[in-house]
Amino acid sequence: MLAYRPIQRVEVMTDSLRHTLINSENNRITNPGQLARLKEKLKQAVSSRKKVVRMVHIGDSHIQADMMTRVLRLGLQYRYGNAGRGIVFPWQMAKTNGPSDIFSFSNNAWLSGRLSVENNPATCGVSGYGLQSNVSDWTLEIGSKPERGEEDAFDIVRLFTGKNTGCLNIRYNGTEESEVCMEPRNSFDMAEIALRMKTNTISLSGKSPDSTAFAFYGVSFEKKKASGVIYHSIGVNGAEYSSFNSDPFFFDQVGALNADCYIISLGTNEAQKQNLNVEDFTLQVRNLLRNLRRISPNAVFIITTPPPSFLHGVALNPKIRTVTEVLVKVSDEENISLWNFHDIIGGRDGLAMMQSYGFYRPDVLHFNRTGYELQGFMLLSALLKSTL
């Protein structure tokens, strides 16, 4: 039985330590030729003031807190331009964790749903979560915290509210107001609102007192006159490949993001099942790819494998290896790219190394912030290597 113990703890990742831990020769994305379309679009984003490249990163709890994806988003936007923060959700209203740069507030309680849970009181949408208010007098405020300032200021708001009808009032920058009236034809319709000036926060309120039900699935913060990358991070605690496949409403709305590239980081939760059915898991991976290709036929794909971890915090989980082998096989057969994080860091040996530096949380299932930032830097380096 393996049981590793940390010998030191790294709270701040220095550049020298980061590069020491990364084997640049092994840190590669397979099938880089498949990324040719993405590479060309990123080049156009630098040379054109109008080109926007839309990345959609789908995952589980490794993604929801945005520690790893924040490194990817900021790194790509630094290189190619910042076209917007992308999809965000009022995670606080759903009583769950979220990115550290996003806050939300409401004057009333909301029913919430999470894509990875059965029998939800509220349907889920583009963010993998959903909120529903059953009162007509409601206000919902959401925005980015001040530290990013102008970098994350936006002047386009894309609201995902499903089949809601009626009008909303949008207030921003203290006195500015806009009104949007929704007459959606489909569940995946969204309202796009151009604001008169940039802001970091919006406040939404209902304007239809005769209608008490209102559903909210997420909002994308974007910029009018900017080229570069929009990096949509969609992480759902407890999610599996099957969680997304079982919710057609999710695909209806994600299609409206017009993804140029999907990055898929799932598999950890499937590996918690020691009786994992390999055939069924393989089918779920293929089904997710098929569902995303249906809504985004021109997108490219990158699958990432989950890191090695413990089972119940006791010993190495052998099913992580099984999940990795399936993902390698499917990516090869589907002719898509793979970033094999599990093998790049050395599997079992990599777990010992990462734990020795204190990069895991006590459950040896999730990384701490420093560990996730290292993972994000590694994937960013591999992605830039394949697209520059």
Image (cartoon, rainbow, N blue to C red):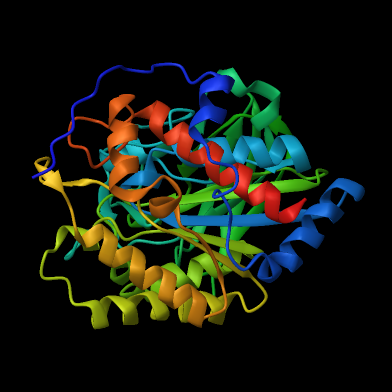
**Whole-percent x, y for residue 76 in the image:** 68, 42
Which quadrant holds the N terminus? Answer: top left
- As displayed, is residue 245 above or below residue 350? below
Residue appearing at x 42%, y 45% in the figure: 345
Instruction: Give above or below for 13 relative to 198.
Output: above
The residue positioned 52% from the left and 48% from the top of the image is 219
| Front-lying residue, 232 or 186 | 232
Residue 187 at least partly seen? no
Quarter residue 125 falls in: bottom left
Please state the horizontal and vertical placement of residue 8, each as a whole percent of the image. 30, 17
Q: Position of residue 266 (x, y in %)?
A: 36, 59
Q: Is residue 296 left or right of residue 327?
A: right
Instruction: Identify the residue shown where x is 41% and y is 54%.
Output: 343
Q: Nearer the viewer, residue 181 or 243?
A: 243
Q: Count the marks: how many? A: 0
Query: Looking at the image, can residue 280 be seen?
Result: yes
163 w.r.t. 210: above or below: below
